[in-house]
Amino acid sequence: QFSTHPYQWQSEDGNARAKFGLDTSKDYPIWYIDVFEISHDERGQGLSRIYLKQLVSEIRNIEDGLDIEEVKRKNPNIGHSSIPPYQIVGKGLWNTSDFWDKMIEEKIVDGYLEDY
């Protein structure tokens, strides 16, 4: 899939990878995960949850170093909600909606990309 932002992540063991970005086009910034995948050999073992938590931690680390004024310059309509932490949403595809529903229920991510 095509990622519209240059952030890329790979787990330390190399079995999971992701592409994600910061959407500043709305009145509030959100992180979106538009690619999240794990190797076929690792699927069905409950590791997706662990990898996604690692990814969310990495996003929070990046967020800590963001220049908030630069975020505001990208969209002058961003208001007080420009102060992190920002919501993190996954791109829910028809064949992965059960996974994303679980991750939302467990409060690992905040919602689906199309909801925002």
Image: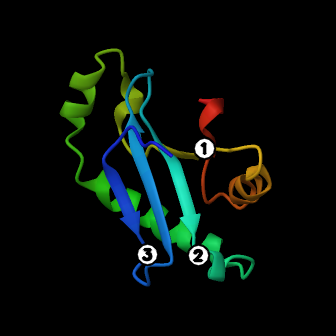
Residue depicted at 32% across the width and 61% down the height: 61
CB-based contact (under 8 Å), mark 3 and mark 2: no
Position of residue 62 measured from the top left corner of the image (x, y, whole percent): 30, 56
Q: Is residue 36 left or right of residue 59?
A: right
* Label of residue 11 in the image: 3
Nearer to the camera, 69 or 80:
69
What residue is disc 1 on? 91
Q: Is residue 18 left or right of residue 101?
A: left
The reply to whether residue 60 is in sight is: no
Query: Within the image, what quadrant is residue 26 found in?
Result: top left
- Which image quadrant: the C terminus? top right
* Label of residue 50 in the image: 2
Check the image and report above or below for 92 versus 38.
above
Tag 1 or tag 3, which sits nearer the N-term? 3
Closer to the camera: disc 2 or disc 1? Answer: 1
Task: Measure how far apart labels 3 and 1 are at the Cα level.
Answer: 19 Å
Disc 1 marks a residue whose amino acid type is Lys
